[in-house]
Every structure is written in structure tokens, then in C-alpha cells.
Amino acid sequence: MNALLKQNRFDFISDKNKKLIEEFTKQMDIFGYGFGGEIGDGYCWGKYMIIYSQKGIKTKKVIARFFLRDNETFIWGGREIKHNNSIVLRLFFSNIEKHESYIEKAPLHIKQPFIDEHGKCNHCKTDCPRYRKTYTIDGKKIEKCSGVVFEFHDPKFEYIQDYMDLLKEFYGKKKL
């Protein structure tokens, strides 16, 4: 990862964020997840994307992504999207209700993506019910569209262990 991030195309990423990505990648590797040695196109989520999935299996389950964003504006699906120089860590979870107690007790920086308004379902009439995440946290029913949930904007190096603990909670200590 270190060699990749030294390429000129990643000059827009701060040294602080490069260190975070490198350490996160190292921690994921320890637990059997990798990024396949490449940083791909980010499509509408950012200029580039790093995708983490389980190593050594054919059907790869993606559990985390980094969206690498530079100062850009583009049109996607008929709407204008603006990004600034930043990174976003997106984690993938199912069966949220099984982990309700863990989330309720988690520090706010971990709990926030589960309870904030980002990704709130507005009951669209297309595929939303099929892709909706519905769960209860602190006695409040929450519905989110699964395409834009569990994002940690500007993740912090000092929270890497918290992100890893959250992944362990959902994917099991033996699997992660």
C-alpha cells in the first residue's frame, strides 16, 4: 500500500490520511482481508477506491472501502456531485439488530453512522424496500437505504482500533 500511495496520482491525499490507510490495511491483512494490491476507480464515490475483501476465496465478500476524494465536481445519474480532498471509510454490515447492544454502548464516533440522518430512507418507490437497512438503536426505529450507510467521513488514525473492533463484532473474531 505504501508504494501505491507514493504514486503522483495520489498527491492530493494528505500524509496523515496516507498513514491511516496504510495502518488500516496492515490491520486488515492481519485478519485475513486485503485489497488485492490495487487502487481502482472510485466512480461516483470519489476519484479512487480501495476495496477490502477476504483473501483466498473465490466469492469475495466486501467488508470495507476507502473512497479517496479530490476537489472535483461531476455529473452522475443526472445530478451534480462535489467532493473535496478527503477520504471516507465505508464499512458493510447486515443484521444490525443482532448488534444493537454493542452499537448503543459504542463511542459516538462509532455509533454516529448508525444513528445520523445520512442515508435516511425516504421510502422511495423503486428498489428501496429490497435494499433497506431497518434496525432499532436506543429505542428508536431507523431505516436507511443501504447504498449510502455506515460511512465514516474523515476517519481518524486514533480510531483504527475502534473500526477494527466494530468489524470484529459483526464478522466474528475467528473470521476477522
Image (spheres, helix red, strand yellow):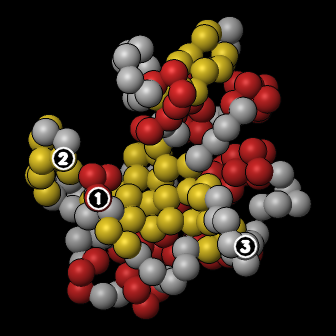
Residue type (three-letter) at the residue carrying disc 2: Trp
Residue type (three-letter) at the residue carrying disc 3: Ile
Residue 76, labelled with which disc? 2
Residue 120: x and y in percent read 43, 22
Q: Which structural element holds mark 1?
A: helix
Contact between labelled residues 3 and 2, with CB atoms less than 8 Å apart: no
Identified at 49% across, 59% down, the residue is 65
Image quadrant assignment for residue 50: bottom left
Q: Choose between 132 and 91: the one closer to the eye.
A: 132
Identified at 26% across, 64% down, the residue is 47
Residue 97: x and y in percent read 73, 25
Q: Choose between 105 and 123: the one closer to the eye.
A: 123
**Residue matched to label 1:** 43
Report how far apart the C-alphas of labels 2 and 1 lie in the structure: 9 Å
Name the outermost residue toward the bottom. Answer: 3
Contact between labelled residues 1 and 2, with CB atoms less than 8 Å apart: yes
**Residue matched to label 3:** 57
Residue 8 lies, with reference to residue 147, above or below; the image says below
Residue 113 lies, with reference to residue 139, above or below; the image says below
